[in-house]
Image (spheres, grey):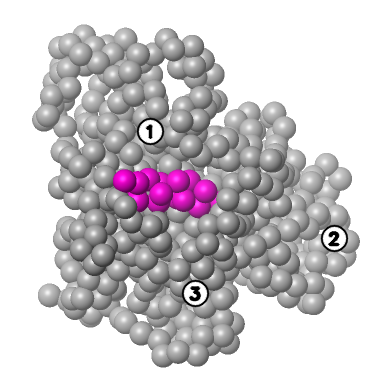
Amino acid sequence: MGATLAEKIYGKAVGKAAVQPGDVIEPQVGLAMSHENAALVINQFKEIFKDTGLEPRVWDPDKIAIIFDHRVPAESAKTANNQKKIREFVAQQGIKKFHEIRGDEGGICHQILPENGYVRPGMIVVGTDSHTTTHGALGAVSWGIGATEMAAVWALGRVLNVEVPPTIKIIIEGELPPAVTPKDIILYIIGKLTAQGGNFRVFEFHGSTVKNMSTSGRLVLANMSVEAGATSGIFPPDEETERYLREEAGVTEPLDMLAPDPDAKYEKTVEIDASKLEPQVACPHMVDNVKPVSQVEGVKIDQIVIGSCTNGRLDDLAIAAKILEGKKVARNVRMLVFPASGRIYRQALQAGYIQTLMEAGAVVMNSGCGCCLGVHQGALADGEVALSTTNRNFKGRMGNPNAEVYLCSPATAAVSAITGVITDPRKGAY
Amino acid sequence: MATVVFKVGNDVSTDAIYPGRYMATVLPTETPQYCFADHKEFNEKLNKGEIPPGSVVVAGTNFGCGSSREQAASCLKGWGLIVVAKSIARIFLQNAINLGLQTIICPEIEAEVGDELEILPDKIINKTSGKTFAIIPHAPARQAIIDAGGLIPYARKKLLQERGAKA
């Protein structure tokens, strides 16, 4: 019987051709990523070594990446102390894939990993962040784990007791209509499958829409696969994957372009006709409360957020700049932009997007996650409404349980920034 | 016998269990104070010591969805709470098992605050309503970690087998 892509990659990580769903394995890790919660990982890592007589050394410092992004620059002494503790650990252990709070090499972990070529097809990637699913866009099996599980990875180099999940095949066909973007596709999928439809499952993406999609767009689909509960979202690597890794990430080594077998066994297949999609909006307070934009038009907005690990890439900022060129953000609206990395910020500066967005009235922030999860910058007041290109809208998500968050694409967000109410981007200047 | 002290619905995220604005607090000794911080009444009861260890939080489907923050498991564990849910999101479930937070998957559970539950290896008897509900046992891969007393002792044993042998 044939194997899905994830079954082959898990297999490779335990020295087999493939494994079956339900098999319990301990896959070797190719990359282990953490952000500020490395502070907790360090504690748990030292606990594992306690009373063993062994010196706490990580299994392979070259396979660990640590990126400061959740609260940058530090919003409190507590965070600053955690970051200091992590810096000391990084130096002591010789961890080189460490991304400081810097404009040259810093940014959000789910952009830093791809743009630096840390993720390759066929790799096992784990991260102490649920959106680690993002890296499946490059043909890796990539999933989010907790801090204690990461401590065990740092000690042993493999993930303990992984039960191989079954795979759901998602086939997306057709050309996207104008102003409909990869974000709208994944919001639609989450609405269709629900927030738990992918729990303990891998999504494997196929179809002509995916084939023609840039890596930037694939990163959006993989990023939000976890919002349907999926362990991972994965794209079979192709010419576009190779182009991205060679041209944008500077990878020169040979790539392991694994593909699923034609007779692979999927738990089920979901088919999406992208040519019929409308722009989508996830309404408060659940990511699967998804409606076509036409059903929520006119909702008054207090804050627009464009950016984050989901939609802070250059093409996202380009869409926003194109729509806002020569226009103004409505007077009663605050618009915050978070480029996904320092590199993207600089590219957007060079392309003139930052100038355009600022002239329209947007505030361009440094790269970071803080606003999305309500820990740093951009908190909402009681009764306020945000329209955001981020990935979660749970109650309290943007720092206030008495506020509401709607999720959408950069096109919908930018058009709505001008009108001050949720607006269909197909009616705008897009 | 375990008393139900709190009941929540479906899709309760880790943002609800442990709001993001407290995420700079990471130590399991410090996280319990923020457990369900936005459910003020329940949080106050916890912090006043009015909820005895071994009490039950009853939840619907997809409990613990969202962020991988381990604080969501450690804050519940800190108060000695037991989670009985119709289903549990993957990362939260693994974190709970790794930290030794008792989690029970009981797809048909019906219970209200104040009900007394008898928790047996294969079922829950709601002594208040007289109804019995089957439990889905944890997968062997997870049970092995529970049996070892959590992931830290489980990983420590493996570490000693591997690095100890080399030394």
Q: Residue at x 35, y 59 (%)?
A: A155
- Residue for badge 1: B10
- Which label sits on residue A118? 3
Describe residue A294's horizontal placement relative to residue B121 as left or right.
Answer: right
Magenta stretch: includes residue A41: yes
Labels 3 and 1 positioned on one and the same chain: no
Q: Which span is picked out in magenta?
A: A36-51
Where is residue A180 shown, x and y percent of the image?
58, 65
Regarding residue A180, the answer to whether it shows in the image is no
Asked if disc 3 and disc 2 are in contact, CB closer than 8 Å, the reply is no
In this rendering, is residue B146 above or below B39? below
Quadrant hosting residue A25: bottom left
- Residue for badge 2: A358
Q: Say few, some or many: other residues with alpha carbon within 10 Å of mark 1 (under 14 / 14 to 19 / 20 or more).
A: some
Q: Say few, some or many: other residues with alpha carbon within 10 Å of mark 2 (under 14 / 14 to 19 / 20 or more).
A: some
Magenta residues, dominant SS class = helix
Q: How far apart in space, not on screen, are marks 2 and 1 (Cα)?
A: 41 Å
